[in-house]
Each structure stands twice: as C-alpha cells, then as structure tokens.
Image: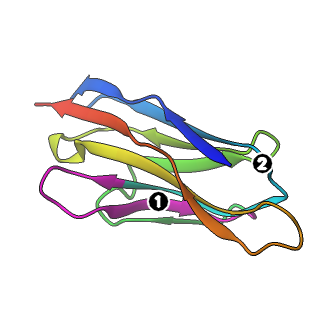
Amino acid sequence: VQLQASGGGLVQAGGSLRLSCAASGSIFSIADMGWYRQAPGKQRELVATITSGGNTNYADSVKGRFTISRDNAKNTVYLQMNSLKPEDTAVYYCNARIQELFCKPVMVYWGKGTQVTVSS
C-alpha cells in the first residue's frame, strides 16, 4: 500500500491550495484519513481528519479556512486550504488507516509529504 500526496507549492498569503492524497495497492477498506503537517523545528501536528462516513475534525488553527474531504471510490483524500497564512508553511503529510485484507488488522500508512510555502 502506498499513499501519494500532491498539490503543494508556493502561494502568497491569502491564497489557496488543494492537496490530494491517493492510496493505492492491496486495499480492502480504509477507515480514517487525515492530514498532518510539520514546520521546521516543530513537531508534527494534526491538521484535519475524516472518517469513512464523512465525519471531520480540524485543528483550531485551521477551522473555517481548511476543508477536508474524500472520494471513497478513488481512495483519495483532499485538503482545500483557503486564506493561507505564513504560519501554515510546513511539509504536509497524508495518513490513512487501511485494512489490506479482511483477515488482516488495520494499519497506519503515511505519505511522503508535500511542501506548502506561504509567503507574506
């Protein structure tokens, strides 16, 4: 199983970006999917998560600006980021809890990360 993230880049403050993360490989089911970020010198932190049923959870710092969504048919999770601020600059990682086969336990997978840089 692999998670491939894309959509990062350089944007001015106030701008928008949309991140995508597609899961591929042997997949029986995907439970929660999410986005985390890590800024230089800081610990990785949760940005947003979404359950298979569509329930969402956001970090206080991004509420009202970021929207997480998923396409279960495509095994893909998205992060729409609006009103970006310089403090949003970080490497963004996608994450998913995946069951490869019905008889196997759910395991956590991480994507390699995509850089988001917001200039002031």
Could you say which disc has been placed on residue 32 in the image? none
Taking the spot 31% from the left edge, 44% from the top edge, the residue there is: 91
Q: Is residue 25 above or below residue 104?
A: above
| Residue type, label 2 | Asn
Does residue 30 belong to the magenta stretch? no
40 to the left or right of 82: left
Find the distance from the CA under tag 2 to the CA under tag 1: 17 Å
Q: Is residue 30 above or below residue 107?
A: above
Q: Is residue 53 above or below residue 19?
A: below
Residue 49 image position (x, y, % from top left): 53, 62
Q: Which residue is mark 2?
A: 72
Q: What span is in magenta?
A: 37-53
Q: Is residue 38 visible?
A: yes
Residue 30 image position (x, y, % from top left): 74, 60
Taking the spot 75% from the left edge, 75% from the top edge, the residue there is: 105
Taking the spot 68% from the left edge, 49% from the top edge, the residue there is: 1
| Residue type, label 1 | Ala
22 to the left or right of 14: right
Q: Is residue 77 visible?
A: no
Q: Which residue is mark 1?
A: 48
17 to the left or right of 30: left
